[in-house]
Amino acid sequence: MRLLEASLLDFRNLAEVQLSFSPGVNVLLGDNGHGKTNVLEALNYPALARSFRGARDEELIRFGSEACHLRLAIAEGEKILDIEVGLDRGGRRRMRVDGDEVHRRVELVGRLATVVFDPQTVELVRGGPEMRRRWFDQGISSVDSEYLIHLQAANRALKQKASLLRDVRRGFSSLGTVSRDLETWNAELAAHAAPLVRKRADWLSRAAQAGRDSYMDLSDEKQELQLVYKQGVGSEDPGGTDADFSREILAVLDYITSDEIRRGRCLSGPQTDDVDIILDGVSLRTYGSRGETRTAAISLKLAQAEIVYGMRGVRPVLFFDDIFSELDKDRSRKLQERTAKDHQVFIATARAEDVAGWEPAGASTWTVHEGVVTIR
Amino acid sequence: MDHATPTPREAAKGNDGGEFQSPALERLVRALGRLPGLGRKSATRIALELVQGGGETAAELAESVTAAREQVRTCSRCGAITEDDPCRICCSDKRDSALLCVVASPVDILPFEKAGFFQGRYFVLGRLLSPLDGVRVDDLPFDRLDARIREHDVRELILALDSSVEGEATALYIQRMIEDLDLSLTRLATGIPVGGALAYTDEATLHRAFQFRRSF
């Protein structure tokens, strides 16, 4: 899969930008704060139907403008996909795929497959569990459209349940009156948690294998990277249908209800899932060196790209936002050459020396200065 | 910018930025603006038509609002909107009491009645379970539903609720409530619309339709 062309209008500090891309390597050079990451953020928007930096839609509109607009032409094999997104200050989002309007995020998410490597990537290993959940939630959503539907439903059910528990804690409701409500919302949560947990277990076992291979490739020492899925709602998967599994999960949720009522919040469920990242038997989050942590985080992102290829048969577009300054020269070059072989890649960097001496055939280079993008 | 030509918004507001010179008209605009789906602009257009337009529209509207307020009530058996209590559907002896269709809102009855194929009766819940909006089990008429099922010897309960999280949770509660009763519980199917093109069906709907495919 590759991006052919993009036109951006009033996106962040980019007033009007028209770009045609190289099918191989694309480099954006420029000082920090001039808009390199903004270009990547725009190009990646359709992949998640939101900003990969976690920004709200309104923040993407250029200061002083009422709306922003982006249009991408994407090639997948012989097929060309035309995606348009418009966002305005009233919170409206218009999305079109090949000229037809789509109304829900799930209809856009995953059409464009990408993987983003940015300075935050290392947080995948170092940071809190929410960083790892975001990683696998995005990874699974991009290969399984049903996953996002269950995830959104489970989150909504959790919100409903949390509001019940909050009311009890504040004394607005008595225990007797909400117990039937809690049972009902637990059942609704469990119905969506079962497929979520199964899909996570399956995806993470693929990621474990691909991640181990990538780590071996990138590092000189032959160490073994391992992933262990820590299921928040501790119930065994009995096999059988999703309905069988959701009954098991419901039993656990009902069992902890009295604790949840005492604490006034949801304690356990798919929202507390995590992954242990282990190198040669030792937890990297606690004991990893800087180099190990960084290489592991990059290996996991590469694994995500490998799974997209394995499950959908397409190579995702890779975005490298300012990550080579964090890696030694040798490892940077290994990563660049390894990925550029199979993928279209976009590299944003302030340091020209990160890519100096590396001139893959057909590469395009732009400079980004005060929101203006010029080809070199 | 040309200051001589006011934008439509400025024109609607009047020149002094927001209010009409007539307090009565302003009051009417505000009242209309509180109705669902009407912003200030539409409210202003409607108010001007009512006040300045010819014909009987305004008088008829005023009279019909008052009459409707007096005459319209909800059916004490099923919750439908009616002028007679119990409603026409609940009273009809052509209807099959053994079939009971549960809907969230009185307007959900309309498409069924328009289509005319359903010969059972209805039960309106009023809302769906949603603690975030302050709606709990105790706020919905489940006790009345339970009594209705027992008294009328209902054989099949058909849930015609939204396929949202709130609709699903409400359905789950009803499922548990009637667990020990001897009747069949069904939900409306979700899938590809009749006459709809497969290519334009969204993935979620297609997935449901596939999951619940039937032998042919």
Image: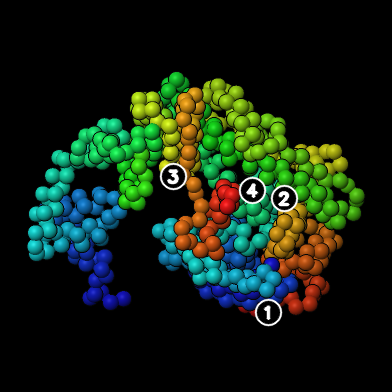
- Dot 2 falls on a residue whose secondary structure is helix
Question: Are both tags, 4 and 2, on one chain?
Answer: yes
Tell me, for residue A137, which label it has, or none: 4
Q: Can you give x and y, in whole percent of width and height, for residue A372 in the image? A: 57, 74
Q: Secondary structure at mark 1?
A: loop
Q: Are marks 2 and 1 in contact (CB under 8 Å)?
A: no
- Earlier residue among tags 2 and 1: 2
The answer to whether residue B178 is above or below residue A286 is above
Please tell me whether mark 4 or mark 1 is closer to you in this view: 4
Label 1 sits on what residue type? Answer: Arg
Disc 3 marks a residue whose amino acid type is: Asp
Residues flagged by tags 3 and 4 on a common chain: no
The answer to whether the residue labelled 3 contacts the one labelled 1, judged by CB atoms less than 8 Å apart, is no
Viewer-nearest of discs 3 and 4: 3
Q: Which residue is mark 3?
A: B162
Query: What's the residue at 27%, 70% (across, down)?
Result: B7
Tags 3 and 1 both on a single chain: no
Q: Quadrant of the N terminus of chain B?
A: bottom left
Q: What is the x, y in percent for residue B57? A: 12, 58
2 vs 3, front mark: 3
Q: Residue type at mark 2?
A: Val
Percent x, y of residue A102: 50, 62
Chain that bears disc 3: B
Vertical relation: B51 (above or below) A258: below
**Residue at mark 1: chain:** A
Residue carrying label 1? A376
Residue of label 2: A122
Q: Give how far apart the Cα atoms at labels 4 and 2 are.
A: 17 Å
Tell me whether circle 3 and circle 4 mark residues in contact (CB < 8 Å): no
